[in-house]
Image (cartoon, rainbow, N blue to C red):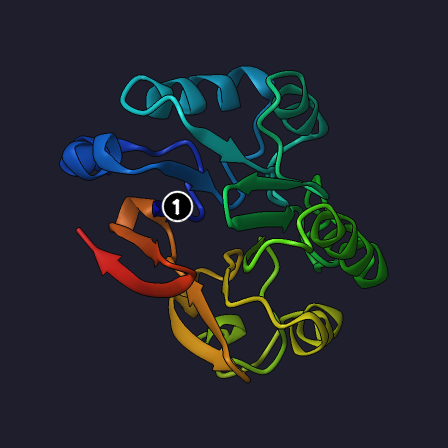
Amino acid sequence: MEILVFGDIHQNINRLKELKNEVVDADLIIIAGDITQLGESTEAEKIINEFLSVNNSVIAQAGNMDKNSVDAYLTEEGINLHGKGYMYEDVGIFGAGGSSPSPFNTPTEFPEEVIKKLLIQGYNSIKTAPVKIMICHTPPLGTKLDRLTNGTHVGSKLVREFIEEYKPQAAVVGHIHEGKGEDTIGNTRLFNPGVFAQGGYVHISIKESVVEGSLKQI
């Protein structure tokens, strides 16, 4: 199974045309959050439709910069990953969107306890899968992926606790644009693709329950 994961899109998909062949060939496209820039469902629908025009297998979740109507739209379309899980043969994919509280009071923020509960909720729906992939807009605390330019770590302690306890094979996060990169917690591979306008994305390949992932750059 070949999966492409895109992070913070913020209504800018100018780079998508450069990836058309890769997107067409993927078995699944995942959008990890921040589909819009403080946008509503109408803006999100335009972005989702651009991806669907080249690949009809797309799941997504709202980020902290998406308004409530975006989450509702994704649910209506049956492609919402937030607090849910999807099974693809032996691969289970689950997620939690939004972010932990920030100084900026963005539209979709949750207490850390809520984010962990959403992750557990999604995980429980795919827990029998041999391969488990976590998609969480909020990065775990204390990694390369939650670090601001000044070195401050601003990720979630409880997201980190979840990873340490439930041990998914791979996790893709976003939210912290400066945190683009790769890291690990235990045996879990972690990825932050950064802002899509800057050309970053994640490619996950799964063969016979073996997960290989890499951060890609257009």
Judge whether 19 appears above or below 116 on screen: above
Taking 106 as reference, is 168 left or right?
left
**Is 47 placed above or below 85 here?**
above
Rendered location of residue 110, percent (x, y): 79, 51
Residue at the image position 50 percent from the left and 42 percent from the top: 89
**Quick check: 139 left or right of 166?**
left
Q: Is residue 36 visible?
A: no
Judging depth in this view, the residue of 1 and 191 nearest the camera is: 1
In the displayed image of the protein, which residue is found farthest to the front? 208
Q: Is residue 201 visible?
A: yes
Looking at the image, which is closer to me, 35 or 163?
163
Up/down of 168 relative to 197, above or below: below
Apparent side of residue 113 relative to residue 99 in the rendered image (left or right): right
Position of residue 103 measured from the top left corner of the image (x, y, whole percent): 71, 60
- Mark 1 element type: strand
Q: Is residue 49 above or below residue 217?
A: above
User: Could you say where residue 38 lies in the image, as x and y percent from the top left?
Assistant: 58, 33
| Residue at horizontal 75 percent and vertical 71 percent from the top | 158
Residue 29 at x, y percent in the picture: 39, 37
Q: Which residue is mark 1?
A: 6
Question: Residue sitting at 39 percent across and 64 percent down?
Answer: 211
